[in-house]
């Protein structure tokens, strides 16, 4: 069977996003590549999302429902395991796909029938000027990605389902930067090729972003850093990139502590980071360290 006739499953994790999720679903159902299935994984929403989606879409989508809130990585993995198609890709419930998104990414496999890696495209912010897909590298390396992590998004990649399952899926212990960890793992093993086209449209109307969920960042701790340090294909030839990523996570952790006004923990973490040489180099973290110490001395919250 030609790749152009192969089925593709688009997996949409969602939580309390009705009716916004309808925009994402409609963009999948409107794909020019017709053998496209839409799998929605509801993460125990409390806003009647499940009931409303069943009423609105019925059999046009596959709806999976978690028995409790288990986060987006679990939901994406569940959808990938459930899918019956040759290819899979993902879509956040507050974003959308251009009509030719699947067709364009599949063209990477059509042009080289022996290609068994990851196809990716660019993403466009809704309401802004068209991005230049020509600026995307034809093939993507770990160094390319680490220099500009905006090149990839969860919405913009497409690959064979069996290969995704083989490479380990999303790390369900991560609720922040889980996409970065996955891409680094995939880039360590697979070739990434650009379809030179916009693969996803990103909307900024969501009321929740992972980087601003400070409690979640603190609960995750240093799990991201421990995962990338354990990737031997990264720590050898790309040690300097690993250290930069560790400093990024340290910066997010310190930022979360400071905005939650946990000054005692901020001071302790900053001092520990200095000993390990893992603190970000930005002067603002040093400034916040001294401000935190002053607040502790003065008893100011």
Image: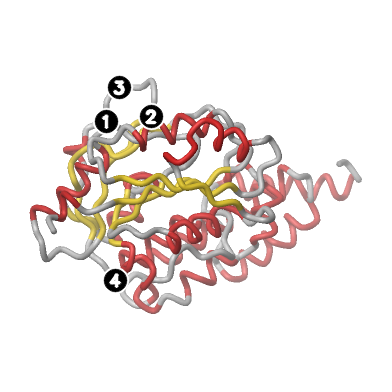
Front-most of residues 38 and 246: 38
How far from the left and from the top, in percent, is residue 219? 69, 59
> On screen, 131 above or below 42?
above
Instruction: Find numbered disc 1 in the image and state the secondary structure of the residue it sits on.
Output: loop
Q: Residue furthest right?
A: 299
Look at mark 4 in the image and give the residue it sits on: 189
Instruction: Find numbered disc 3 in the image and state the secondary structure of the residue it sits on.
Output: loop
Front-most of residues 205 and 260: 205
Look at mark 2 in the image and give the residue it sits on: 125
Instruction: Find numbered disc 2 in the image and state the secondary structure of the residue it sits on.
Output: strand
Which numbered circle lies on residue 273?
A: none
Which numbered circle lies on residue 129?
A: 3
Using a 10 Å C-alpha cutoff, classify the residue at mark 2 as few (fewer than 14 neighbours), some (14 to 19) or many (20 or more).
Answer: some
Q: Residue at x 69, y 61 (%)?
A: 269
Mark 3–mark 4 CB contact (< 8 Å) = no
Which numbered circle lies on residue 131?
A: 1
Mark 3–mark 1 CB contact (< 8 Å) = yes
| Mark 3 → mark 1, Cα distance in angstroms | 6 Å
């Amino acid at each position: 069977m030609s790749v152009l006739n192969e089925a593709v499953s688009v997996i949409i994790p969602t939580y309390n996003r009705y009716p916004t999720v309808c925009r994402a679903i409609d963009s999948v159902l409107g794909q020019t590549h017709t053998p496209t299935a839409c799998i929605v994984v509801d993460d125990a929403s409390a806003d009647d999302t499940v009931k409303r989606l069943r009423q609105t879409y019925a059999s046009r989508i596959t709806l999976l429902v978690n028995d409790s809130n288990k986060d987006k990585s679990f939901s994406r993995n569940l959808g990938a395991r459930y899918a019956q198609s040759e290819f899979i890709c993902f879509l956040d419930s507050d974003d959308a796909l251009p009509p030719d998104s699947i067709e364009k990414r599949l063209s990477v496999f059509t042009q080289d029938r022996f290609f068994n890696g990851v196809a990716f495209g660019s993403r466009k912010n809704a309401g802004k000027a068209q991005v230049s897909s020509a600026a995307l590298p034809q093939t993507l390396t770990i160094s390319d990605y680490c220099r500009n992590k905006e090149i990839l998004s969860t919405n913009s990649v497409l690959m064979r389902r069996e290969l995704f399952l083989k490479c380990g899926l999303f790390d369900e212990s991560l609720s922040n930067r889980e996409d970065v960890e996955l891409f680094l793992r995939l880039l360590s093993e697979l070739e990434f090729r650009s379809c030179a086209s916009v693969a996803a449209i990103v909307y900024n109307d969501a009321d929740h972003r992972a980087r601003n969920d400070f409690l979640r960042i603190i609960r995750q701790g240093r799990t991201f850093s421990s995962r990338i340090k354990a990737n031997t294909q990264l720590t050898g030839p790309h040690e300097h990139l690993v250290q930069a990523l560790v400093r990024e996570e340290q910066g997010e952790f310190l930022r979360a502590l400071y905005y939650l006004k946990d000054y005692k923990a901020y001071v302790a973490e900053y001092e520990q980071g200095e000993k390990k040489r893992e603190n970000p180099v930005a002067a603002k973290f040093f400034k916040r360290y001294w401000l935190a110490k002053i607040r502790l001395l003065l008893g100011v919250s």
